[in-house]
Image (cartoon, rainbow, N blue to C red):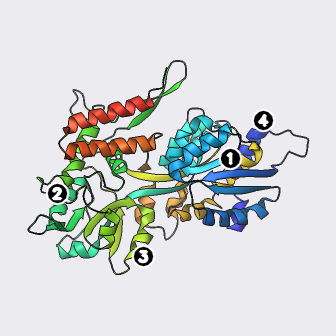
């Protein structure tokens, strides 16, 4: 890694030029080159990140990084408090949802330094969520596409030859893979879907909404050039309102936790899905590609395989969900020259593979998909992985759980529950006057 740290990172040159032309670097004095120390806050574990930093700092020579881990669930609040006290970091590295939630505090990389075409040519399509009309608010360092894990032994036991590639195939094979005792309790389950305790329930639902061709939250500009967000997850797709994407997807999703359905294979009283999957009591588990190694390590005897996230038949779209980390420089940085140098280099080809490996991801470079030996599932999925403007991550997750729970407990019908969910999202994204 060392030999690549300071090589082949064209972004550093463009960011450095931006600082010169913006006046943030004073040409002609000893500050012409980045010097000094910057603090980076991140949600990645401190120990492996410090190993990267300790290798990076001697190579950087005139500047250095100090890394501090901040837990994801308290990141926004801790950052707010630190900035108020004047003790905030220079950079942040976090999941894309946190980056988006802090967009107003981030220094946007101008189009003159990193244009839209250059950005999109360099990074996978999902990374475009970092790109605004005025430029990039962050650079991606890692991506994990959402995939389907399955147990080959359970498939063979029940006469299922291949994993499902489409959602209608999922509904066909789940009854074959599900066994219940005479009291209706699950002995083996086909898939963990439908209940509030489904891992990544919101991510799965919104990924399928994307397959129907709908963007959950759309960024738009008014006549004054002001950016605002529109919640359109349930806007009808066909003339006359024939298909309401979110309602259709939630109705499909919830059937797997409905005891009256043939596809019933999971419920809100079950334990952790990954535990059931590793114990070979669950045939299919939807998660992120980086989980494969851990799942196999937990039960080396199990034949655990990975395949692409199921698609919606008859749609021209081909997409899956994603987990992505990014790095960004804050406007409040006391040393922007070093901060931008670090941002460009940590997102470069020399260091980002090591950062991505910490979370089980891969670098978000488009060209990385052609890496020899890379799983064909990952190489194909990373190019079509997408996220959505989920800047109110904690609230939207809670709203999703409430929506599903209301449906399963007959407090609301599917249409009413999804309407309430959309209304709650609209309240979040509507700025206070």
Indicate the quadrant where residue 356 lies.
Answer: bottom right
Lower sequence index among marks 3 and 1: 1
| Distance in Å between CA atoms under marks 2 and 1 | 48 Å
| Distance in Å between CA atoms under marks 3 and 4 | 51 Å
Q: Can you tell which mark lies on residue 21?
A: 4
| Distance in Å between CA atoms under marks 1 and 4 | 24 Å
Q: Can you tell which mark lies on residue 297?
A: 3
**Which is closer to the viewer, label 3 or label 1?**
1
Q: Residues within 10 Å of mark 2 (few under 14, many from 20)?
A: many
Task: Name the residue at 27% across, 49% down.
Answer: 312
Give the SS element for disc 3. helix
Residue 195 position within the rendered picture, expressed as x and y whole percent measured from the top left: 26, 52
Give the SS element for disc 1. loop
Task: Name the residue at 29% across, 33% down.
Answer: 420
Residue matched to label 2: 264
> Measured along the vertical axis of the image, is residue 229 above or below residue 180?
above
Closest to the observer, 184 or 377: 184
Residue 266 in view of the camera: yes
């Amino acid at each position: 890694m060392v030999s690549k740290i300071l090589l082949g990172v064209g972004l550093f040159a463009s960011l450095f030029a931006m600082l010169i032309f913006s006046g943030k670097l004073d040409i002609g004095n000893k500050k012409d080159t980045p010097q000094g120390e910057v603090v980076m806050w991140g949600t990645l574990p401190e120990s492996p990140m410090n190993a990267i930093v300790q290798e990076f700092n001697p190579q950087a020579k005139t500047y250095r990084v100090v890394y501090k881990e901040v837990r994801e669930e308290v990141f926004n609040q801790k950052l707010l408090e630190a900035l108020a006290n004047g003790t905030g970091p220079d950079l942040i590295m976090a999941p894309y949802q946190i980056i988006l939630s802090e967009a107003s505090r981030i220094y946007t990389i101008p189009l003159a330094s990193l244009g839209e075409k250059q950005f999109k040519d360099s990074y996978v399509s999902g990374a475009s969520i970092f790109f605004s009309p005025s430029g990039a608010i962050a650079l991606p360092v890692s991506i994990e596409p959402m995939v389907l894990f399955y147990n080959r032994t359970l498939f063979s036991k029940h006469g299922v030859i291949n994993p499902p590639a489409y959602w209608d195939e999922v509904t066909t094979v789940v009854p074959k893979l599900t066994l219940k005792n005479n009291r209706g309790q699950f002995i083996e389950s086909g898939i963990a879907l439908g209940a509030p305790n489904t891992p990544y329930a919101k991510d799965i639902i919104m990924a399928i909404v994307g397959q129907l061709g709908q963007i959950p939250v759309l960024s738009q500009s008014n006549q004054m050039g002001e950016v605002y967000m529109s919640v359109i997850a349930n806007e009808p797709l066909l003339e006359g309102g024939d298909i309401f994407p979110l309602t259709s997807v939630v109705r499909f999703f919830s059937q797997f936790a409905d005891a009256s359905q043939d596809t019933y294979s999971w419920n809100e009283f079950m334990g952790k899905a990954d535990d059931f999957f590793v114990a070979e009591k669950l045939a299919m588990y939807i998660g992120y590609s980086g989980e494969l190694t851990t799942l196999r390590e937990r039960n080396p005897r199990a034949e655990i395989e990975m395949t692409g996230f199921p698609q919606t038949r008859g749609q021209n779209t081909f997409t899956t969900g994603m987990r992505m980390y990014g790095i960004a420089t804050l406007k409040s940085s006391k040393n922007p020259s070093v901060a931008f140098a670090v941002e460009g280099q940590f997102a470069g080809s020399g260091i980002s593979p090591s950062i991505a490996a910490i979370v089980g991801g891969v670098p978000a470079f488009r060209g990385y998909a052609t890496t020899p030996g890379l799983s064909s599932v990952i190489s194909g999925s990373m190019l079509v992985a997408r996220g959505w403007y989920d800047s109110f991550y904690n609230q939207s997750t809670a709203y999703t759980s409430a929506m599903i729970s209301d449906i399963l407990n007959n407090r609301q019908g599917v249409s009413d529950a999804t309407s309430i969910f959309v209304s709650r999202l609209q309240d979040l994204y509507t700025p206070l006057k």
